[in-house]
Image (cartoon, grey):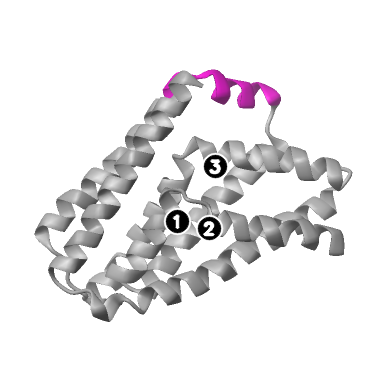
């Protein structure tokens, strides 16, 4: 157990601060919406991580080779992230309001958005494959030890994100009107940049 914990904590912290689309969207949601919305979005992302962990742990080598060698997988992933970015830019032009009633109705939307942002990023799958191979060799591919490793890693990730969400939410009262629109516009361009990077990386690498 201690061995799994020692490997899981650093990786959980790294995963929480990894500069990917979900990192920025969680912070943006906490600032422009609420801590609850950001947390629900985070849970959606973790569900995608769980699916990828299952693929990495139980997946066949043929599936992994297919994903690595199929250019269309990377292109579709990049396009999906770009579409999210365009959505944020379009939404920034309409302005945002803090309405708890609307937030309650959109909790499912936040969950689905978090899931899709992580699930459509094929790089996250490759991260879990690499992690499973590397840590598996250190833990002798022991099933119980690996299970504890995954639980501790995702637990650390979620705990760090809770603090991250709370810290970002403190800026909410300072951002109103045009400032909120600017945050969402910047988020849109960041996601578009990530989408282009994902697509280009899978074409040329």
Q: Residues within 10 Å of mark 1 (few under 14, many from 20)?
A: some
x then y, percent, for residue 13: 62, 61
What residue is rendered at 40% in x and 66% in y?
38
Q: Nearer the viewer, residue 204 or 157?
A: 204
x then y, percent, for residue 31: 32, 70
Query: Most prominent secondary structure in the magenta stretch?
Result: helix
Measured in 3D between alpha carbons, the distance from the residue under mark 3 to the one under mark 1, in whole angstroms, is 12 Å
Judged left or right of residue 33, residue 143 is right
Quadrant occupied by the N terminus: bottom right
Judged left or right of residue 45, residue 65 is right
Judged left or right of residue 155, residue 33 is left
What residue is rendered at 36% in x and 75% in y?
169
Contact (Cβ within 8 Å) of mark 2 with mark 1: yes
Mark 2, secondary structure of its residue:
helix
Q: Residues within 10 Å of mark 2 (few under 14, many from 20)?
A: some
Visible in this render: residue 205? yes
Marker disc for residue 17:
2
x then y, percent, for residue 79: 33, 33
Visible in this render: residue 107? no
Residue assigned mark 3: 124
Q: Which residues are magenta?
A: 61-72
Mark 3, secondary structure of its residue:
helix
Mark 1, secondary structure of its residue:
helix
> How many labels were placed on the picture?
3
Marker disc for residue 23:
1
Which of pointers 2 and 3 lies earlier in the amino acid sequence?
Answer: 2
Marker disc for residue 164:
none
Q: Residues within 10 Å of mark 3 (few under 14, many from 20)?
A: some
Is the residue 163 above or below the residue 199 in the image?
below
């Amino acid at each position: 157990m201690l061995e799994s914990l020692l490997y899981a904590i650093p990786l959980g912290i790294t995963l929480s601060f990894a500069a990917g689309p979900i990192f920025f969207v969680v912070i943006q949601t906490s600032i422009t919406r609420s801590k609850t919305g950001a947390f629900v979005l985070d849970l959606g992302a973790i569900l995608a991580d769980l699916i990828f962990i299952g693929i990495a742990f139980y997946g066949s080598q043929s599936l992994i080779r297919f994903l690595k060698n199929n250019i269309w997988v990377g292109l579709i992933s990049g396009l999906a992230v770009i579409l999210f970015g365009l959505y944020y830019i379009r939404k920034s032009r309409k302005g945002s309001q803090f309405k708890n009633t609307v937030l309650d109705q959109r909790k499912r939307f936040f969950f689905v958005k978090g899931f899709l942002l992580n699930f459509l990023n094929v790089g996250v799958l490759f991260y879990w494959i690499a992690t499973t191979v590397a840590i598996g060799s250190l833990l002798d591919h022991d099933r119980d030890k690996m299970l504890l490793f995954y639980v501790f890693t995702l637990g650390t990730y979620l705990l760090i994100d809770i603090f991250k969400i709370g810290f970002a939410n403190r800026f909410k009262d300072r951002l109103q009107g045009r400032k909120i629109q600017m945050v969402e516009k910047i988020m849109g361009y960041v996601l578009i940049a990530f989408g282009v990077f994902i697509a280009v990386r899978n074409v040329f690498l």
